[in-house]
Every structure is written in C-alpha cells, then in structure tokens.
Image: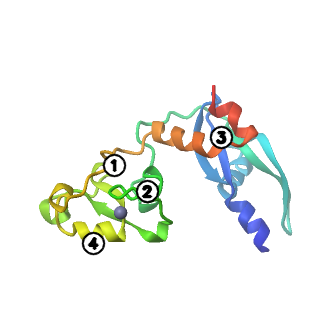
C-alpha cells in the first residue's frame, strides 16, 4: 500500500455505543475490522475511499456498535501510550508539552520506596525533570505535580474525544449534547 492509504488507515474514528453514546476513538484500520465482522455499522463517512486488490470501501468517520456494550469504570489498559494520552503529552512537573519520544514515565513514589506501577503512581515526565527527581519524592526534589494522577476513566476518554472532535462536524453532534 502507498503512503497515503497508510496514513488514512491511522486516521481516528469515533466509536459510539448502540445507545449513540461516544465510547472510544480507534484508528480506521481497526474500525474497518469491526465493520467487516458486522459488530458495528457506519454512522458517518469520511468521504474518502480505500481500494486494495480485493476490496474497496468508504472510510468511516463515526461507527456505532450493533449491540450495547457495558463499559466498565476503567476500560483502558495501563500502558505508556495511555499514560501519555491521559496526561496530554505534558510533563506533569514542568508542564511542557512534548512529543512522545521526549517523554518518559515517572513513578511519583519511586519503586525503591515501594511505589507501585499503577495509574495513580505513574505520570508523563520529561527527561530533564526525571533526571532532576531521581530516586526522590517530588517534594524532596522541589517538584510539584500538575495534578494527582488518576485512572483513565470514561470521563478522561470523553474529554479527549471532545478535544479531538471539536473541529469535526461529523463528530460534534455525538460529542456535544
Ligand atoms: Zn519536565
């Protein structure tokens, strides 16, 4: 596949529950799998078409699950990507917004002091602050957290979805109600 379709496959698609409640954002690549499996239907199209040797389809912009899915309080897996997403790619100490490659994860309470690898003890952190903090608590290093880290909840997802969908007419009507 050429570069353009590759980029298109990564484009974000808004996922709605059967009840039209927005629940997730997924790349076109995964949204298309849900459509082919018959798990979801297209609500809004992107306007673009994708062609491959065997098929051609309209790129979705918003899809909806056919069956209502109960979304548990915490749906996101604990991962570097999700922590960075939760913290909006912002160093939680110096507040600089940086590309993912310039950010690392900091254990607020260092592991050497029994700090756990969990949502409420991991934050996005720039290399400079990370080095400065070392094996200490933030206050010992003269650092202050932007906000206490929390699990990635549906509330967090919704804030992100609203941020991403602000300028997209096809998303807006599902996100701002
Ligand atoms: Zn920093």
Q: Which residue is mark 1?
A: 146
Q: Position of residue 135 (x, y in %)?
A: 18, 68
Which residue sits at x=33%, y=49%? 146
Which residue sits at x=44%, y=70%? 102
Q: Is residue 118 above or below residue 176?
A: below
User: In which image quadrant can residue 20 be found?
Assistant: top right
Q: Position of residue 50 (x, y in %)?
A: 83, 60
Please identify the quadrant where the C terminus is shown. Answer: top right
**SS for dot 2:** loop
Q: Nearer the viewer, residue 13 or 34?
A: 13
Cα separation between marks 4 and 3: 36 Å
Which residue sits at x=15%, y=66%? 112
Left or right for 68, reference 141: right
> Which comes sooner in the sequence, label 3 or label 2?
2
Cα separation between marks 2 and 4: 16 Å
Give the residue furthest to the top: 177
Q: Which residue is mark 3?
A: 166
Left or right for 4, reference 86: right
**SS for dot 3:** loop
> Which comes sooner in the sequence, label 1 or label 3?
1
User: In which image quadrant can residue 1 be found?
Assistant: bottom right
Q: Which residue is mark 4?
A: 131
Q: Which residue is mark 2?
A: 90
Left or right for 43, reference 81: right
**SS for dot 1:** loop
Q: Position of residue 13 (x, y in %)?
A: 67, 48
Asked if labels 2 and 1 touch by Cβ distance under 8 angstroms, the answer is yes
Cα separation between marks 3 and 2: 20 Å
Q: Nearer the viewer, residue 156 or 72?
A: 156
> Which comes sooner in the sequence, label 4 or label 3?
4
């Amino acid at each position: 596949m050429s570069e353009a379709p590759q980029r298109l496959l990564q484009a974000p698609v808004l996922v709605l529950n059967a009840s039209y409640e927005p629940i997730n954002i997924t790349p076109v690549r995964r949204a298309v799998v849900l459509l082919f499996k018959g798990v979801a239907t297209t609500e809004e199209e992107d306007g673009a078409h994708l062609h491959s040797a065997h098929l051609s389809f309209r790129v979705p912009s918003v899809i909806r699950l056919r069956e209502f899915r109960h979304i548990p309080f915490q749906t996101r897996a604990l991962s570097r990507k999700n922590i960075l997403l939760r913290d909006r790619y912002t160093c939680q100490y110096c507040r600089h917004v940086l590309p993912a490659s310039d950010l690392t994860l900091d254990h607020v309470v260092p592991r050497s002091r029994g700090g756990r690898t969990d949502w409420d003890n991991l934050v996005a952190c720039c290399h400079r602050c990370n080095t400065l903090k070392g094996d200490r608590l933030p206050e010992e290093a003269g650092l202050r957290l932007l906000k206490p880290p929390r699990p990635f909840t549906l509330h967090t997802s919704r804030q992100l979805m609203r941020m991403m969908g602000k300028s997209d007419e096809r998303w807006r009507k599902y996100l701002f109600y």
